[in-house]
């Protein structure tokens, strides 16, 4: 399995256009590297590539990745489709930028498909441009992605603001397995709580991409003076007794990577005490553009 980290920031990217917090100021000055919004590209054969989420930064991300360049035909693309973890705008708006493509597949939780295909969603517009195939992913049932086996697992119930009121899970994690090598990746950029069901998904996982949106439960309030309802956003914090880092310490044999970093997150600064703490635990924050194999 080939993996390319296309983006690692939460909605708005880093620095965020309308934020003058200390980190964003340093990002604008070049003192800290900028980051595009969270997105991963995976392939089981090096030819057919799948995007995990499609952020508004997708054009820049595709142009920066040689593996995703078009060809050999003038309109050929190695991108076969998109797997959405939710219907949130920062995860799905990039599909608009892929509208010129035809024949791609879009996988998402059933609620997300319903929301995206509603009058307020992107589906009706996308259907006017290209023939995409829409798939509601059943939880826990495997489906094939050109040599990879994928399964979707519910991990959250946060509904996007534009979406209709529907019961049931809205957010999923994807488990991707390469049967030819045995490599297994779990992608969970949005995780509300560390539950027994989530921990069961970690069995046999070689690499975990985990929600690193906020370091602490009060981060936005401390750094911007306005929390904007951080506690209701559906993101487990990294640090603290109930944080994800304490859980990750119990899995030293697994490659553990934080992604979806909010612009207020001190993990954006590799010299911060918070970065030193996760590094000491063997957990990583990768730069955009990182590539590796499983």
Image (cartoon, rainbow, N blue to C red):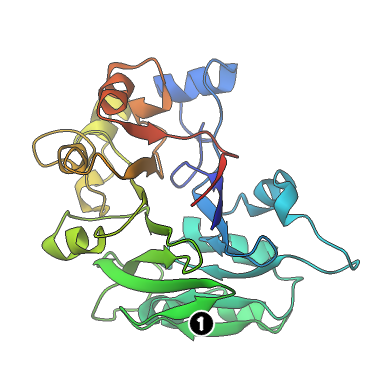
Which quarter of the image is occupied by the N terminus?
A: bottom right
Image x and y of residue 8, in percent: 48, 42
User: Disc 1 marks which residue?
Assistant: 117
Q: Position of residue 289 (x, y in %)?
A: 60, 40
Quarter of the figure with residue 265 = top left
> In the shown orientation, is residue 187 left or right of residue 202?
right
Q: Is residue 118 visible?
A: no
Give the percent coordinates (x, y) of residue 36.
Answer: 56, 41
- Residue at point 14%, 59% (across, down): 195
Q: Is residue 205 left or right of residue 57?
A: left
In the image shown, does 25 or 10 lie closer to the viewer? 10
189 relative position to 216: left or right = right
| Picture layout, residue 52 above or below residue 290 | below
Q: Residue at x 66, y 67 (%)?
A: 48
Q: Quadrant of residue 174?
A: bottom left
Residue 245 lies left or right of residue 127; in this view the side is left
């Amino acid at each position: 399995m080939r993996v390319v980290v296309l983006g690692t920031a939460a909605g708005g990217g880093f620095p965020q256009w309308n934020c003058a917090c200390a980190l964003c100021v340093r990002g604008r000055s070049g003192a800290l590297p900028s980051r595009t919004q969270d997105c991963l590209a995976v392939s089981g054969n090096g030819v057919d590539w799948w995007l995990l989420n499609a952020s508004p930064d997708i054009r820049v991300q595709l142009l920066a990745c040689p593996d995703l360049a078009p060809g050999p035909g003038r309109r050929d693309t190695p991108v076969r489709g998109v797997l959405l973890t939710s219907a949130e705008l920062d995860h799905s708006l990039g599909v608009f930028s892929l509208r010129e493509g035809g024949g791609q597949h879009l996988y998402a939780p059933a609620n997300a498909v319903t929301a995206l295909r509603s009058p307020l969603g992107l589906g009706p517009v996308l259907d006017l441009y290209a023939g995409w195939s829409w798939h509601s992913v059943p939880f826990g049932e495997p489906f094939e992605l050109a040599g990879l086996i994928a399964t979707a697992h519910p991990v959250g119930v946060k509904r996007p603001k534009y979406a209709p009121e529907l019961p049931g899970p809205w957010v999923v994690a994807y488990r991707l397995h390469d049967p030819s090598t045995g490599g297994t990746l779990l992608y969970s950029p949005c995780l509300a709580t560390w539950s027994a069901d989530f921990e069961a998904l970690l069995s046999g996982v070689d690499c975990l991409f985990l929600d690193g949106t906020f370091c602490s439960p009060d981060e936005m309030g401390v750094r911007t003076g306005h929390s904007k309802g951080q506690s209701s956003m559906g993101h487990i914090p990294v640090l603290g007794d109930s944080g994800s880092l304490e859980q990750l310490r119990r899995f030293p044999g697994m490659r553990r990577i934080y992604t979806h970093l909010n612009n207020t997150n001190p993990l954006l600064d590799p010299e911060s005490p918070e970065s030193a703490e996760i590094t000491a635990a063997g957990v990583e924050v990768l730069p955009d553009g990182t590539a590796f194999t499983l």
